[in-house]
Amino acid sequence: MIGANNRDSHKSQVYAAEDLSAELTVLVEPQPIEQLQGVVDDLCASPWWVRHFDSRPIRVHTNRSAQRSYFNPTQRCISLSPVAHDLNTLLHELAHAACADLGRTGPVHGPEFRAVHVLIRTAVTGQQSGDDLRKVYEQFGLGAGQLSDLDEPSHAPILGGAPYLAERIVGRPGFASKATAHKGPIAL
Ligand SMILES: [Zn+2]
């Protein structure tokens, strides 16, 4: 429950930071939902995830009724907006799932969320991707926090050889420069 004093005050800054860090990368490319489900399945079966989080399956659905994406802890499902079938949104929601598994009670998009988010980016898309997100969070004045009970993912990135770096898709139409405004659907 978010109190009237706005415990989730970093929300819009978190969205802007993650959008900036994902811009021009594979993270923002639309993906078939089956592929996103496969990423979730592989992550949840990874030694790092099993060591720290609940390994019960997380289902990925399309939310056709609203322009938003969210994680439902009761149903243990991630519901993605029809226009947000991408890794950027998926990894954000996976960070919410991981925080729920840890029983974290801090602000929804606070330092603990950001620390977990960075680790999940590392686990799925590799060290550079995680480092990039951490740096952008810091540039936005958003410390990613330290979770002493969580270690860094030591396995190969879930997406293995999949391209993360911007060079692969620089110049594609539709990826213009403005990165500061959150233009997509709301990711809760
Ligand atoms: Zn969120």
Image (cartoon, rainbow, N blue to C red):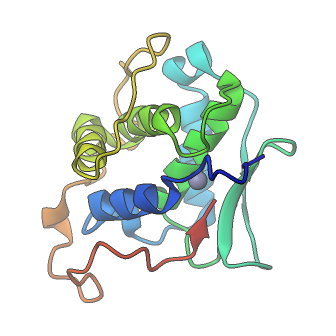
Query: Is residue 80 visible from the viewing direction of this image?
Result: no
Percent position of residue 123, x then y: 41, 33
Percent position of residue 109, x then y: 54, 46
| Residue drawn at 53 percent across, 53 percent down | 9
| Residue drawn at 25 percent across, 80 percent down | 178
Question: Which quadrant would residue 100 be assigned to in this image?
Answer: top right
| Residue drawn at 52 percent across, 56 percent down | 11
Percent position of residue 107, x then y: 60, 40
Indicate the quadrant containing the C terminus: top left, top right, bottom left or bottom right. Answer: bottom right
On screen, residue 51 above or below 178: above
Question: Which quadrant would residue 122 be assigned to in this image?
Answer: top left
Give left or right: position of 94 versus 128: right
Query: Is residue 121 visible from the viewing direction of this image?
Result: yes
On screen, residue 182 above or below 142: below
Give left or right: position of 141 versus 182: left
Percent position of residue 185, x then y: 57, 76
Give whichever of 141, 146 is nearer the camera: 141
Q: Residue lying farthest front?
A: 5
Give whichever of 82, 47 is nearer the camera: 82
| Residue drawn at 45 percent across, 18 percent down | 147
Q: Residue lying farthest right?
A: 74
Q: How many marks?
A: 0
